[in-house]
Structure formats: C-alpha cells, structure tokens
Amino acid sequence: MFNHDVLNFNVEKFSLGAFNPNFGGVDGGRIDPSLGVGLRRTDTKEPIAIVSDSYEPVQYLNIVENLEQSIAMSGIDLDGAVFQTNVIGNGEQLELTAKFNAEATTIDGRNDVVTPQFKFRTSHNRTWANNGMMGYFRSACYNTLVDGNKLAYVYGRHSKKFSVTSFASKIRAASDFIANDGMDQMKVWYNTTVDRDAAISLFTKTLAKRMDNVTKKEVANKVMLSNLMKTFDEENRHLIGRGNYEGYAKQNKGTMWTAYQAATAWSTHVGDNAKNQANSRVLREDKVRKMLASNAWKELEVV
C-alpha cells in the first residue's frame, strides 16, 4: 500500500545538553536541558523537535502498518487504489493519502467524477496529532473535497494504542456514507441554483471574512473574495455554460456545487508561497468544513 521505503527510519530521544551543531541554540549548539529532551533520527542524527521527558515516540512505520491493516479489513475495494506517502522535511511530519478509484462515481452521470479519499496526518514535531478522515477527490480539478461530517475520523495523541478493527469499521461506514447519503447531498448541491450575489454573500460571511484592525468589525477580505468568485465563475462556465460563455454570462448564476468547488479549490491549491503547504491545507480545509456547517451555507439550500 503505502511506500515503506521512505519510512525506513526511527526516531529517538537525546539530551539537549549534548553538543549538536545542527540544532541551533547557544554555545555552539547546546540548549538548556530544562526545556525537555531532543528528538532526532537514528540514521542521520538530525534533530526534529524538543519534547517533554515523558514523551514516547511512536515510529511512523508502526502507525502506517496499523492503518494498512484497517484499510485491508474494511472491505473497501482496493482495485486500482492509489497510495501516496509524503514525508515532510527531515521527518518532522507525515501525510498519507489513499484514493479508492474502484468506488468512484459521477455527480452529473457523465464526467464529473468524485472518488472516496482517505487522508491521514501525523508528526514527530508535535505540530499534528494522529488524525485522519475520509473525504472525496474530484478528478476534474484535482480538488480535495471536504465533507461537513468527519467521516472515518480518527484523532489522538501519539500513542501505541490503536484499534485496527474499530478503525476498519469506520472506514467501511464512511465509504458507505459517501456512496449513498454523501452523493445524494452533492447531487442536491449540483442542482440547487445560486446567483452570484448569494455566492458573494456566502464567502463574505465565511471564508473571506476578516476582522478590521481599526474598526474591530468583520469585513470582507477583498482579494480573497475576488479569487473565490473568479473560481466560482470559471466552474459555472464549464458546468452551466458548457462552452457557451455568452449564454452563461446572461444567466449570472451558478449552483451550490460550483460554490463548493470554489471553496475546495482554495483549500486544496495553497500556492508555492505558503511556508508549509501541508499545514496551510489543514487550516483551510477546517475553514471549509466550518463554512459547510454555517447558517450562510444552509440558507442556500432553502432559497
């Protein structure tokens, strides 16, 4: 399944008082031992983080093997599945993605394909606890589609305790939800009209909302709002206009589906300027999830 070769390293604790020129600090690399202990790779001795004395690292490979057992036991169709393993930095973070292509389906009955996708993140530098959930992947735009529900959700501090059978059942239940209730919901969005003013209002109240430093009132982030609406318009030209851009322009409207795509495009494609793209995606995906739970979004369904 996942690439074990890039996970073929362990981490260990070491004394911060020990000389380590790679770790920064003062006096040629020495760091105050009262801060805790260091965490480093055993193969390269590269430092990764400062942790508490009581912290017990769990090796990435152990975590991945447990996840693989859960996926295999879940009964989800693995034919044509794609597994990606992304070790970030020198091992500080790990991001796993599994796309279950055999269980893909279409929103429009033609070529708008949506695929169940599982993402899992963990870290050795304490930026991410063990966390993962099932969602969707849209082939047309390479968007990771965030679901308002936390499907097959697993979260916890770094611990050796992990129930393979329990998580396997969560993956199966999430896959069943996606194939039935989840797809039904998306089809509702696909067929629910949203005019441009309503989309502007949605994004102003959610993703493009910011606090004015002077007035201390919530206002729109105009640059972000403009970018979201640009994607909204592009999606509408493809899905509604079907190439008839002049005809589309006269309608001046879209759907909940295209508004959703504008939001997930923003959360997926963070740009090369992001200091840590993986961290940025996590934060943005959470904001999209909150948008889907907002009154502003729910009101679109009843307009």
Image: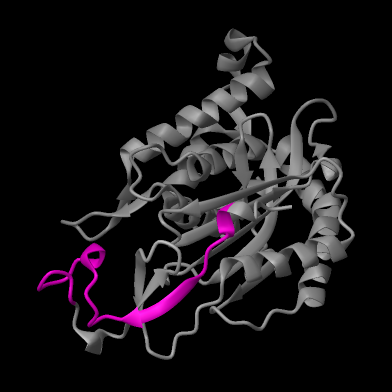
Q: Is residue 100 visible?
A: yes
Is 279 drawn above or below residue 263 in the view shown? below
Residue 96 among those drawn in magenta: no
Residue nearest the observer in this picture, 178 or 166: 166
Magenta stretch, residue numbers: 6-30
In percent of width and height, residue 125 lies at 41, 69
Of the 4 image quadrants, the one containing the C terminus is top right
- Magenta span: predominant SS is loop
The answer to which of 121 and 52 lies nearer the viewer is: 52
Is 141 located above or below residue 134 in the figure?
A: above
Queried whether the magenta region covers residue 7, the answer comes back as: yes
Of 13 and 165, nearer the camera is: 13
Q: Is residue 302 visible?
A: no
Quick one: which residue is furthest to the left in this view? Answer: 27
Q: What is the x, y in percent for residue 234?
A: 55, 23
- Which residue is at 23% across, 86% downward? 33
Q: How many numbered markers are drawn?
A: 0
Residue at left 60%, top 51%? 85
> In the visual, does 274 lie left or right of 289?
left
Q: Residue at x 62, y 82 (%)?
A: 160
**Residue 233: percent from left, percent from top:** 53, 25
Q: Is residue 218 above or below residue 269?
A: below
Residue 144: image quadrant is: top right
